[in-house]
Image (cartoon, rainbow, N blue to C red):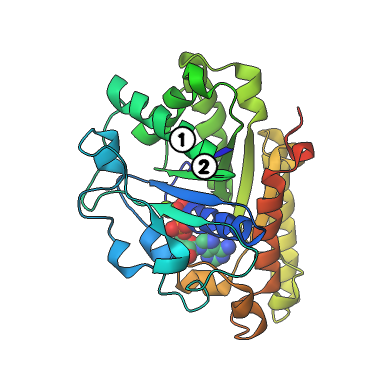
Amino acid sequence: MLVFAVSDKGGTGRSVTSGNIVYRTALTGRDVCYLDFDFGSPTAGTVFQIEKLVSGLPGTGLHSYLQGRTQTPNCVDVWAESEGETLRRQPPGSGRLELFPGDRDGGEFPASEETVARCAELFLSLEEQYDVALVDLSAGRSYAVETALAATSAEQLRHVTVRWLVFHRWTHQHIRAAHDLVHGANGIIAAGKANYHDEGELRRSIRFVRTAVVQPNSPSLAGLRPEQVAWLENCNGSLQTLAGRLGLGRTSLLGTVPLEPLLQFREQLISDHDVRQRRTANQETVDAFASLAEKLHDERAWEAM
Ligand SMILES: Nc1ncnc2c1ncn2[C@@H]1O[C@H](COP(=O)(O)OP(=O)(O)O)[C@@H](O)[C@H]1O
Ligand SMILES: [Mg+2]
């Protein structure tokens, strides 16, 4: 399965949530890889806690591969290379967790016929080697999104299961932006059609993920004043209405990740150890990541809307 992570804006939680989704998927025993296609601002090294990759790889990453400077992109085993205390050892029963970083100082580059062909070849080979290959794409209607849409329309990838996750924060502005990224005049559906995708199939493969959502009645917000809770509930209602009207309501929603204080301060994977022993992260956050990971493989979550 190929999973594409997109968002209209930067800072939506796309990379951190995606990283945690692949981590949770690996913990269930599936083999997963994460591809850093955020060509302008690599973050995967930070999220997976691999210091030497914080600003990408010198030379042999995805930029080099897609632009034809190396035959195979470098792949890093997160269980072996991460400096994260609980990531360093592969838990028994878990699958492979591997990372394909971009190049240091790589930058954005347009989708040429050659990059698209190389990209399709890579996707096909990763789809065969892993249960899930998640591709974290640059924000907005970027070259990376264009490349992914063009590559997945290639004949040899037609049989592959493809999912699109659209990440957005829970505000009026973000809901509208996420809608436009998918349904706008120059959005993913329009661009997909221009790339010879079947419109119905493409629509069925897209789901939204709400990130960093304040849940007014969550136990972790027990200290809020009644006026604050009432205001939040009111606002939440108006956001629900807007989301429903723009086609981001219940049927197209894959899941919601609560606001997690730990992630406000650091981009990272959250382990069960962080929740149970250190008690620095909330169980609801990990449950949300695990649920998203599970739903990737739950056909009922991807039925026609
Ligand atoms: N559920 C959450 N609660 C609180 N902060 C979050 C949550 N998810 C992500 N963040 C934080 O939001 C910021 C942006 O996240 P990031 O994944 O880098 O966004 P993007 O990839 O969309 O640019 C990071 O500091 C991250 O740790
Ligand atoms: Mg990111």
Helix, strand or loop at label 2? It is helix
Q: Is mark 1 within 8 Å of ligand 2?
A: no
- 284 above or below 148? below
* Disc 1 to disc 2, C-alpha distance: 6 Å
Q: Residue at x 49, y 16 (%)?
A: 155
The secondary structure type at the circle numbered 1 is helix
Q: Mark 2: which amino acid? A: Gln
Where residue 121 sits, quadrant-wise, is: top left
Q: In the visual, does 66 lie left or right of 276?
A: left
Along the line of sight, which residue is nearer the eye, 269 or 141? 269
In this rendered view, identify the residue nearer to me: 159 or 153: 159
Check the image and report above or below for 164 versus 254.
Answer: above
Residue 173, given in percent of the width and then of the height, sits at: 53, 45
Q: Position of residue 16 (x, y in %)?
A: 50, 59
From the image, tell me which residue sits under label 2: 129
Name which residue type carries label 1: Ser
Q: Quadrant of residue 69?
A: top left
Query: Could one spot residue 104 in this view of the protein?
Result: yes
Q: How many marks?
A: 2
The spot of residue 243 in percent (x, y) is: 67, 41
Return the mark for residue 139: none
Where is residue 120 drawn, in percent x and y? 42, 28
Q: Are marks 1 and 2 in contact (CB under 8 Å)?
A: yes
